[in-house]
Image (cartoon, helix red, strand yellow):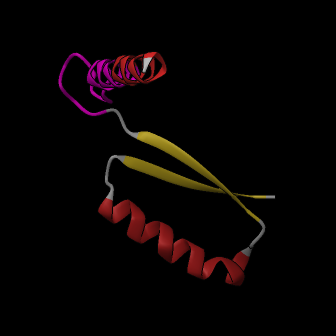
Amino acid sequence: MRFSFFFRYASLLSLLFLVANFAGAQTNKSDSGSVKPTKLVVWGLQLGKDSAGLEAQIAEFERRNPDIDVSVMSM
């Protein structure tokens, strides 16, 4: 019974800790209210014609997420 009480207490404490952390998480907005663009770098092995499908996917992703700038680096 003592273990059960301790487990419930620890679970509740952990849950409260997680809620407090997520509630205080910073957003991607500056003090002026404007959104800072996020830069995402994708590493790939494809070059030229082989990367046409990847470029189309990136273009669609950027259209759906205008605040994220994606750049591709070939290795």
Relative to 57, 34 lies left or right:
left
- From this view, report whether residue 11 is shown above or below residue 49: above
- How far across and how far down the image is residue 29, in percent? 27, 27
Viewer-proximal residue, 23 or 42? 23
- How far across and how far down the image is residue 2, in percent? 45, 15
- How far across and how far down the image is residue 41, in percent? 60, 49
Q: What residue do we see at 31% from left, 63% from top?
A: 64
Viewer-proximal residue, 38 or 3? 3
The residue positioned farthest toward the front in the image shown = 1
The residue positioned farthest toward the left in the image shown = 33
**Quarter placement of the C terminus:** bottom right
**Residue 37 picture quarter:** top left
- Asked whether 25 falls inside the magenta stretch, the response is yes
- Asked whether 15 falls inside the magenta stretch, the response is yes
Q: What residue do we see at 53% from left, 47% from top?
A: 40
**Quarter placement of the N terminus:** top left
Q: What residue do we see at 30% from left, 18% from top?
A: 20
Relative to 41, 60 lies left or right:
left
Magenta residues span 14-35
Relative to 42, 10 lies left or right:
left
- How far across and how far down the image is residue 30, in percent? 27, 21
**Residue 17 picture quarter:** top left
Viewer-proximal residue, 48 or 54? 54
